[in-house]
């Protein structure tokens, strides 16, 4: 069973069933083709068309199938944690300051 712990995208062939385990809360986005989703601890199945999304909980198991003709494309988007976003913001600011200082310290 493949584990989803980071953002990833892949294709599912018609008739194929892909078992997955969600390691971190994430969002499933259908990018192409129809996808049938079965979730652990859920009595409902989900029939998702391109553009539809489904929020997934950490620890749940999924079974994805592509229905119809052709392949289905799905993407999993793991949101970054607050502390990761803050570190990324500080890193971008540091890069901008460094670039600005290099530009200001030119010698002739």
Image: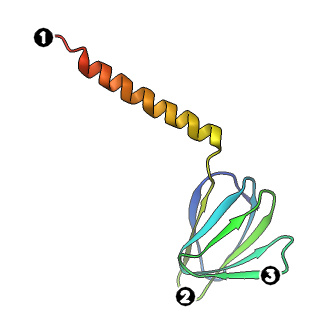
Question: Considering depth in this image, is 15 or 43 the residue closer to the camera?
Answer: 43
Percent across and percent down for residue 40 are 83, 70
Percent across and percent down for residue 42 are 84, 75
Residue contact between numbered discs 3 and 2, judged by CB atoms under 8 Å: no
Residue contact between numbered discs 3 and 1, judged by CB atoms under 8 Å: no
Disc 3 marks which residue? Answer: 44
Disc 2 marks which residue? Answer: 69
Left or right of 99, for residue 63: right
What is the crowding at mark 3: few (fewer than 14 residues within 10 Å), some, or many (at least 20)? few
What is the crowding at mark 2: few (fewer than 14 residues within 10 Å), some, or many (at least 20)? few
**Secondary-structure class at tag 3:** loop
Question: Considering depth in this image, is 18 or 32 the residue closer to the camera?
Answer: 32
Disc 1 marks which residue? Answer: 108
Percent across and percent down for residue 70 are 52, 83
Residue in the image at 80% along x and 81% along y? 44
Left or right of 96, for residue 5: right
Mark 1 and mark 2 lie on one chain; the one further toward the N terminus is 2
Percent across and percent down for residue 7 are 59, 54
Residue in the image at 12% along x and 11% along y? 108
**Is residue 6 shown above or below 19?**
above
How far apart are labels 3 and 1 at the CA level? 71 Å
**Is residue 43 shown above or below 61?**
below
């Amino acid at each position: 069973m493949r584990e989803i712990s980071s953002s990833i995208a892949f294709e599912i062939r018609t008739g194929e069933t892909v078992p997955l385990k969600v390691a971190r809360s994430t969002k499933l986005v259908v990018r192409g083709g129809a996808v049938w989703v079965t979730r652990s601890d859920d009595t409902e199945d989900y029939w998702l068309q391109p553009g539809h999304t489904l929020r997934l909980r950490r620890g749940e198991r999924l079974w994805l199938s592509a229905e119809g003709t052709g392949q289905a494309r799905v993407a999993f988007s793991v949101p970054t944690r607050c502390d990761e976003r803050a570190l990324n913001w500080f890193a971008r600011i540091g890069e901008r300051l460094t670039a600005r200082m290099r530009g200001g310290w030119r010698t002739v």
